[in-house]
Image (cartoon, helix red, strand yellow):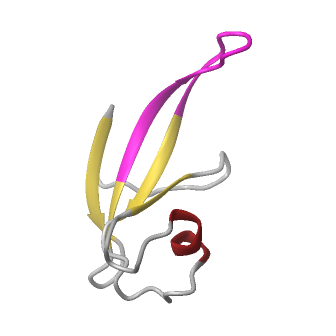
Amino acid sequence: MGSQEYELGVGVKTRVYTLPFLGTEDGTKAEVVASCHIDTSAWNPKHVAFQVLKVKPGSVPVCHFLPREDLIWIPK
């Protein structure tokens, strides 16, 4: 598993991970990308992520998987 931290915009830190996945039914292998927003203190407290995770803004990173069609630009 690899990770790298990037600044996206002004002061917005995001850590990106690549993870190996293995299908439980047929053993299909895939590599997926997850994005973790490190500092969520400026987010709206009513954001659905906080409701689902039962946390407050700025208390924990908020991570999610990226759909196949999304792009992440990574510097060399």
Q: Residue at x 55, y 70 (%)?
A: 49
Q: Position of residue 30 (x, y in %)?
A: 58, 25
Q: Image quadrant for the N terminus?
A: top left
- Quadrant of the image occupied by residue 8: bottom left
Q: Position of residue 67 (x, y in %)?
A: 65, 50
Residue 34 located left or right of residue 24:
left
Q: Residue at x 33, y 66 (%)?
A: 60
Q: Is residue 11 above or below residue 76?
A: below
- Quadrant of the image occupied by residue 59: bottom left
For the question of whether residue 6 can be seen, the reply is yes
- Quadrant of the image occupied by residue 51: bottom right
Viewer-proximal residue among 49 and 31: 49
Q: Is residue 65 above or below residue 14?
A: above
Q: In the image as oriented, which residue stretches furthest toward the top?
A: 26
Residue 21: say if magenta: yes
Q: Residue at x 30, y 36 (%)?
A: 2
Residue 22: say if magenta: yes
For the question of whether residue 76 can be seen, the reply is no
Q: Position of residue 41 (x, y in %)?
A: 34, 84
Q: Give the residues drawn in magenta, as a range.
A: 16-31
Q: Is residue 26 above or below residue 32?
A: above
Q: In the image as oriented, which residue stretches furthest toward the right?
A: 25
Residue 71 located left or right of residue 56:
right
Q: Is residue 11 above or below residue 38?
A: below
